[in-house]
Amino acid sequence: MAISKDEVKYIANLARLGLTEPEVEHFREQLGDILGYVDKLKKVDVSGMSPMAHVLDIKNIYRPDNISPSIAPEKILKYAPQHEGSFFKVPKVIE
Amino acid sequence: MTNIKYEPVIGLEVHVQLKTKTKAFCGCANEFGSKENTNICPVCLGLPGSLPVLNAQVLVGAARVALALDCTIRHFIKFDRKNYFYPDLPKNFQISQFDMPLSENGHLDIKVDGISPKRIRIKRVHLEEDAGKLMHPEGSISSLVDFNRAGTPLLEIVTEPDIYSPEEAYAYLSDLKLMLQYLDISDCDMEKGSLRCDANISIRPAGETKLGTKAELKNMNSFKAVKAALEYEIKRQAQSLDAGERIVQETRLWDEKKEVTLPMRSKEEAHDYRYFPEPDLPPFTFTDADIEGMRNSLPELPQQRLRRFVENFGLGEKDAAVLIADKELADFFEACVEIYNEPKKISNWISGPVLFNMNSRNSSFGALRLTPGHLTDLICLVEDGTVSNLVGKDILAQMLAAGSAPKDIVREKNLAQVSGADELNEIIEEVIAANKKSVDDYACGKENALMFLVGQVMKRSGGKANPKVARSLLAERLKRT
Amino acid sequence: MKLNFLTAHELLEPPGQGSISSGDIVSDLKGRIESVEPKVKAYARQPFFEKALNQKLEAGWLKGLPVSIKDNICSDGDLTECASRILCGFVAPYDATVVKKLREQGALIFGKTNMDEFAFGSSCENSAFHPTHNPWDLDRVPGGSSGGSAAAVAADEAIMALGSDTGGSIRQPAALCGVVGMKPTYGRVSRYGLIAFASSLDQIGPMTKDVRDNALLLKAIAGHDEKDATSVKTPVPDYLASLEKGVKGMRVGIPKEYFIEGMDPEVREAVNAAKAKLSSLGVKFIEVSLPHTEYAVAVYYIIATAEASSNLARFDGVQYGFRAAVKTDGAEPGLISMYKQTRGQGFGQEAKRRIILGTYVLSSGYYDAYYSRALMVRALIKQDFDKVFNECDLILTPTSPSAAFKIGEKTDDPLSMYLSDIYTISVNLAGLPALSLPCGFTKASLPIGMQILGRPFAEEDIYRLAFAYEQSTHWHKEKPKL
């Protein structure tokens, strides 16, 4: 199944993945091959099947509404790429 | 401000934070106002390896809201991931519900301007997690992120496009908030962000049935702002259409200071959220019995309470509406009736003097610290003639200022009504002496003059004279002249 | 004999009186690592020699035994980088539940093993640190993605290790390195603290020198965890107690779809010989059919990459790990550039490939054709197993179609690399337990593994069969010449 460079670029943008031009071409080819392979699923008779919700028959797993201790912010801020006081810092968000 | 040429069509999307003790998927405290990044843990930070586990109170709380809105609850519930990148979203996906929301197809019956009934259909009510908070310091090239709010349980309530004016939108929001307060499910405080509202609005020529192109309005921080933004947007879209332009489908932000809506500055992308079932959370189920049990445990809702006040207490619809519009006030009213079975008199006192004091002090009812016992004592003092109505109102003001009991105030300030003939006759003689003209007028048959003279007696007694007794004593005395 | 060559059960119950100190074990491991690690490169970074010796141990039945763990399992205060540049410098601020359990029972966390970046791969070549080499032939791969754990155990650089298995990542390297590896039933072992690849498929499991050690380590890590909603409350049996119950009368299925072309004749021969051996021990073999087997790889690569694309979205340079020095070209806002450059530079080729594939199959217009359909076929694959397990107790298959391949041999051909997971993938899709254990060697002296599959939560039965076979063979006693 052939897919276009623009499709690869659209997907890469959705995934916020910066790709070089050669990478775009490379992944375009490989993605085409893999999608060609997985196309075999179209042959399977899935009538009467519904998408599997969970591999085991478990449901209704809750936790009680009880407070457990939070972690000390320093423990994580210490390794943050950038922070200011106790805030994480990122390039300006434009709304 | 309705434009006759065009008809607006509005749909509202309300987000309500549930006031559970802990967040939706971890044990961090769900509280507003903590120091930044202190209510955090591996789960709500989305740290590698962490996993969500649903808070047991969340699904039940959400289901109660859905049932109060007469929605159909699903028996099989799953969560989905909504994938998009944003720095306030720790995992860069939000746990939400996509194709199988908790509930659908409900409605809320509202009263526009407190009078005209209207049914707003609810499209869906679903659960999701809130994001963190972004700060944009003025002039900085950076934004700052606080994840305290991340993972707070959030209910999304979406209406059908059934709202046709900003006034209806306002009424819907007020009535929805009231219902949520009755359910005791959320603080519903727009300033703190525990209730937020986005609006979709389009306009179309009056009589047209096809919907126009809509704009999505965000960033309104109060119900009034929602109303103002919708009013502005109707005008803006009408001007565009009049000028022969086409409406662009876009998101616009309400600018509170400039009182305009402006398109978002960031580039809007096609929404491709790549929803898929959240694999870390096995599904949830409700049986018919579960749903019936939750329905039966719903508290009385505002409209039900209104009907009961009208039917059981004989209140007028309008008076009842005033009481139920504030849950605390309505609770207080009922506590008073328990003590003193005169619902109408109590209702009059509450909607009159009590609300007057509340409004003039610009305080909430709770802040008045009025107890049912004190108010009913006061009403009894007026009813048995110990004090006049007028003095009663005065005493109320003093009660609220000092928090003291009405009987104490009457005793301390010697405010008991004077009904004794001896004391009153003394005053009557003074009044007659000072108002010769009115006495003559009465003698000539002017009945009104008697009312004036009674008024003078009241004034001279400092309001303490019992007006009924004073009137009859005065009439008798005048006959003798 | 140096202590690092012993198994865990030998170290726990040394012949004669007295016990062995964990310091002695660590020091022998250190000696071994200093001599062979430069050739094998099984670890992600230097193990905790000093820290391990100074660590205050909890009293417990594991008596200070060192356990090596894969670099995608969080341990409090330690670098946990998933062999990826994007997690460079990430120090986990908490213990994974398996780590917590091990510590509570007296084990010592010894070091972090190398892996394919984010567990994406079958060769351990996709590591941002270095490729790991197969101790049996240093020119060959150890398998993956838990190749570091497998190689460390095989080379006696670890007493035992934990790996993770999403589509064969414990069993295939175990087979290629000649060790025992178990992928437990989905939900048997808590995933809390395992950096997720594909949440609905991932399981942590033990990789050990023999079956007894494997049962011992699983016993230590299995059980319900309230922090993992997908972990189950089924009680954990004493896997060690039932090892020796024997296999007489056990019914073992041989799925005809697994013995197909493309299988290395030496692998076929070894598995057939193992069948004969087991028959002699009283096992009854029956041919069974798993008709949807040929779709497993396709289903797997849709579901696994879709989940991975979402799980890996959090690696964005905001809170932790690598952030690119952003060059804003003006075309995009700084934040978007930061995301794209961080992720573009932080992820390796295979990670990017899988993120793109996973994003694609979930994107608007393709969900039904790919993801939704894959979930339906997944249900069919599970049904196949449900039916077969009415006829037999266990299933026997090869673990991998061939023995270890050469480093670099398949790096340019992702599809053929994906196809080498053919025997292991269905197990994850169906949530079943499966174990790989040595069943012979090729003429070139490369280990061959066979796989035993069981019903959900039938790890006990698997261990019984594996132990009976192991007791009647000597494969697990062979050591690579290093």
Image (tube, coloured by chain):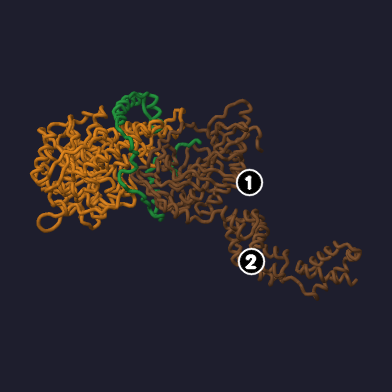
Q: Splitting the image into 4 quarters, where does residue C399 fall?
A: top left
The chain shown in brown is which?
B
In which quadrant will I find the C terminus of chain B?
Answer: bottom right
Q: Tell me the kind of residue under disc 1.
A: Ser
Left or right relative to C214: residue B341 = right
Q: Check disc 2 and report its element: helix, strand or loop.
A: helix
Most extreme residue toward the left, as rendered? C280
| Residue B222 makes an appearance in the image | no
Write the residue at 70% across / 63% down: B393
Give the residue type that dot 2 points to: Thr
Q: Residues within 10 Å of mark 1 (few under 14, many from 20)?
A: few
| x and y percentages locating residue B210 in the rendered image | 56, 31
Residue C176 lies in quadrant: top left
Q: Seen from this angle, which residue lies furthest bottom?
A: B422
User: Circle 2 is placed at which residue position?
Assistant: B376
Q: Is residue B402 left or right of residue B23?
A: right
Return the chain for callout 1: B
Q: Which mark is residue B116?
A: 1
Q: Comparing marks 1 and 2, which lies closer to the viewer? A: 1
**Protein chain holding label 2:** B
Q: Which chain is orange?
A: C
